[in-house]
Image: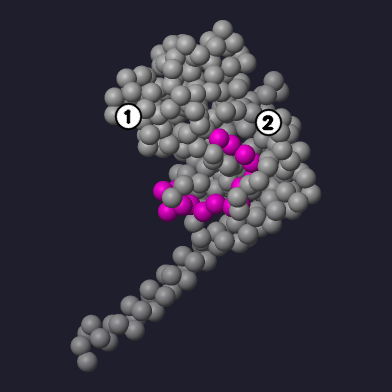
Amino acid sequence: MSLLRRGLPLILSLTLALAGATSARAQAALDEIQKTKTIRIAIPTDFPPYGSIGADMQPQGLDIDIARLIASKMGVKAELIPTTTANRVPYLQTHRADLVISTLGKNAEREKVIDFTMAYSPFFIAVFGPKTTAAAEPAALAGKSIGVTRGSVDDAELTKVAPASTEVRRFEDNNSTISAFVAGQTQLVATSAQVAAVMMEKNPKLGTELKFVLKESPNFVGVAKGEDALKAKVNEIIAQAKADGTLDAISKKWLGKPTGDLPL
């Protein structure tokens, strides 16, 4: 018998052992949460009304309420970790956070690297601009400048429809994107209706209006790949909150309207 053939059983055993260890690690999050009585949740702090810093210097918003609801139903403490659009997915991949509750939309690219629970709140993104700027459809973006947050769903959807001659200016976070538009550095902005509403309320003289919708994109909780037990637990909590009216109450509190129909 050759050395290679004699070594095959050992190689196979080692491979199965490693696979088992990887599987065990992949399902360890819920056990660790229950053991430490703490769940680490990445949340936004620059994206009102979903997440911002209140007058008391504490996080507040729809996503923060959802994070605290999940922690409460699990009987553990919520450790809230501020995140940005660009590092939400990496926080899950590097196990810096157990969950991401930060206006996270589901798309095919993200589903390759993380998992999603059922949706917990409504969300849509659109192009906004002054009433004096004509942009009722994607073709009208040709030759115009538009701001968007790098790596966001807004960015992905805008990139799909923007003509080649559109000057797309990408910024690192939502505050920078909105600030650039308000300062006149871009003619238009692609963002969520909620963010735009706050911007328009604070800057009425800009005469900003909705131009056209880019995508209906409800929010989902992000979970690391393979953490099926944790995902199932969060789905159970969201489903119950949806059935008993808690999700509607939170949505009305922050968005002024109930959740409506949300995808699973």
Q: Position of residue 44 (x, y in %)?
A: 57, 33
Instruction: Please tell me whether residue 45 is drawn above or below residue 105 in the rendered image.
Output: above
Q: Position of residue 218 (x, y in %)?
A: 58, 42
Which label's residue is closer to the chain start, 2 or 1? 1
Q: Position of residue 197 (x, y in %)?
A: 60, 22
Determine if the magenta segment contains residue 123.
yes
The residue sitting at the left extreme is 2
Which residue is disc 2 drawn over?
A: 255
| Residue at the spot 38% in from the left edge and 23% down from the top edge | 140
- Assess disc 1: are there few (<14), some (14-19) or many (≥20) residues with their C-alpha within 10 Å of its C-alpha: some
Quarter-of-image position of residue 62: top right
Which residue is disc 1 drawn over?
A: 163
Instruction: Please tell me whether residue 40 is drawn above or below residue 6 in the rendered image.
Output: above
| Amino acid type, mark 2 | Leu
Look at the numbered disc 2 and give the secondary structure of its residue. Answer: helix
Regarding residue 180, the answer to whether it shows in the image is: no
| Amino acid type, mark 1 | Pro
